[in-house]
Image (spheres, rainbow, N blue to C red):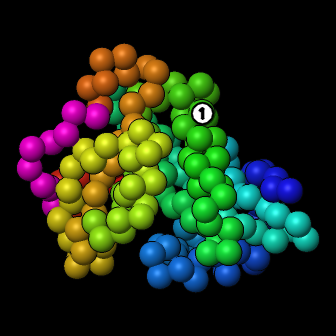
Amino acid sequence: MTTIRRFCCNDLLRFTSVNLDHLTETFNMSFYMTYLARWPDYFQVAEGPGKRIMGYIMGKVEGQGESWHGHVTAVTVAPEYRRQQLAKKLMNLLEEISDKIDKAYFVDLFVRASNTPAIKMYEKLGYVIYRRVLRYYSGEEDGLDMRKALSRDVEKKSVIPLKRPITPDELEYD
């Protein structure tokens, strides 16, 4: 049985195996601690039998006005737990928090342009490619900014794609 619960400090010492995937962005401890302290509702872990960490999602809420949005900083599932809809459950939870609690207009995320399986999964969840960010990943690989409008964005203005790619220094938020 899988339990989804709020991430806690002890999990930082137990989630290394989930982060070993080459497509998973990893960060330093202070980065994770900042998210844990500032946006605890947006940092959730999926735990399986024997308290084994199966995956997690880390995000935040940011922006102003119609740019107020939930952001998925990282979502990853250990290889042995993929194809069980776990990422979908974690994404749905973050979207629900963004929509119902924080009244955000949309949720966004960045994904490597080469990560076709993830892009297809996000599209199945209702995300669209909003724009391409040139050399977003380590100054080498392009990233795709994908978005999903929430209930507050009745006219779906937040997901109208931009016609041209941008560079990382043109991003509004980090």
Could you tell me residue 64's position as x and y percent?
A: 36, 31
Q: Quadrant of residue 79?
A: bottom right
Q: Quadrant of the N terminus?
A: bottom right
Instruction: Specify the segment rendered in magenta.
Output: 159-167
Residue 164 left/right relative to 122? left
Q: Image point 59% across, 41% down: which residue?
A: 92
Count of number-bearing discs: 1
* Residue picked out by circle 1: 96
Residue drawn 63% across the image and 53% down it: 85
Residue 156 counted in the magenta span: no
Which residue is nearer to you in this view: 164 or 49?
A: 49
**Residue 132 sits above or below residue 94 on the image:** below
Say whether residue 47 is visible. Answer: yes
Residue farthest toward the left in the current orientation of the protein: 164
Can you say which quadrant of the picture contains the C terminus? bottom left
The image position of residue 101, as x and y in percent, is: 61, 27
Residue 62 seen in render: no
Q: Residue 171: percent from the left, percent from the top?
A: 24, 52
Callout 1: helix, strand or loop?
helix
The kind of residue tagged 1 is Glu
Residue 60 lies left or right of residue 86; in this view the side is left
Q: What is the chief secondary structure element of the magenta stretch?
A: loop
In the image, residue 131 above or below residue 96:
below
Residue at x-position 20% and y-position 56% = 132
